Structure formats: C-alpha cells, structure tokens
Amino acid sequence: MKKMIQVLTVGMFVSIFSVAASAGIQPSLRGDNPLDKGEQGIAVKKPLTVKGGIERSFKKQPPMIPHGIEKDRITLKGNTCMKCHSAENAKKEKAPEIGESHYLDRDGNKLAKPSSRRWFCNQCHAPQVDAQPLVELDYQPQK
C-alpha cells in the first residue's frame, strides 16, 4: 500500500510538470537557471523607487516599500527602518511614521515602543522591483 502511494505521488508530480512544460508554464521562479549555478545565474532586479508611495490594492493592505532595502538590517537588537519611520524621526526624514497599530500588544493595550510582533517590517511590508509579472494577472483593485 505504501509503495503504491509513493508511485502514485511520483506519477502525479511527473504529469503536472510535463503538462506545465508543454503548456509553456514556468515550473519554477528560477526560470531556466539550474540550481547548481547558485545566485550567479539569477539577474538581480532593480529596486522600484516610487515617490509618494505605491497605491494599495485593497483595504488594510500593508503599504509596500517604495525604495530599496538592500542595506537595511533588522535584528533583535536593531532595526534600521526606524531611522526614518519612528515617531521621533519621521517628520525630519519626510517619511511615513509607522502606524498606531504597531504600538499595540496582542490584547490591544497601548505600548510606549513598537510591539515586538511588529518589529520585523518585511514580514508584512515588501519592497518592489522593476519587473514584469511572472504570470498574467487580471486582478482589479478594490475601491
């Protein structure tokens, strides 16, 4: 029984990838770059910089990061995002201040510092790059 399940699973994966290949669907985000080439085989995309920010696609969507973050570091002891986005620095840096929700604990109590649950910014906020979509999209933003 166990052997039959393994054979069926392998057969399913082979058929999915052969259908994807014959339909011209890219089976991997790496494209045609083989795994043994490592990072040298992947072209680095230019960070998308958008003055004034990137429009949100739906209500309550975390804002996207409209600038490169290659040099930013977030560790347990420090967060370089706070150099511009903290309450103390946002006005001076002409950057958006982190939201009030970032100062609430899990029970909704107001904190003096950003909650540790909100410390790792790129967990929700993502930088954008100047690239074409990998697949055709027909999504229409909610207004």
Image: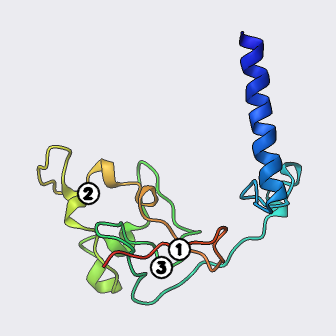
Q: Residue at x 81, y 39 (%)?
A: 14
**Is 56 on the left-hand or right-hand side of 48?**
left
Element type where label 2 sits in the image: loop
Residue beneath disc 1: 138
Q: Looking at the picture, does residue 36 appear above or below residue 83? A: above
Question: Badge 3: few (under 14), some or many (20 or more) residues near its Cα, within 10 Å?
Answer: many
Residue beneath disc 3: 66
Mark in the foreground, 3 or 1:
1
Give the residue type at disc 2: Pro
- CA gap between label 2 and label 1 equals 37 Å
Please provide percent x and percent y for residue 123. 44, 55
Give the residue type at disc 3: Pro
Please provide percent x and percent y for residue 39. 79, 58
Which residue ends up furthest to the left in the rendered image?
109
Tell me whether circle 3 and circle 1 mark residues in contact (CB < 8 Å).
Answer: no
Mark in the foreground, 2 or 3:
3
Q: Nearer the viewer, residue 52 or 82?
A: 52
Q: Looking at the picture, does residue 135 appear above or below residue 19? A: below
Q: Nearer the viewer, residue 22 or 99?
A: 22
**Is 86 on the left-hand or right-hand side of 18?**
left
User: Residue 33's quadrant in the figure?
Assistant: bottom right
Residue beneath disc 2: 114
Element type where label 1 sits in the image: loop
Question: Badge 2: few (under 14), some or many (20 or more) residues near its Cα, within 10 Å?
Answer: many
Give the residue type at disc 1: Asp
Question: Badge 1: few (under 14), some or many (20 or more) residues near its Cα, within 10 Å?
Answer: few
Q: Residue at x 76, y 60 (%)?
A: 26
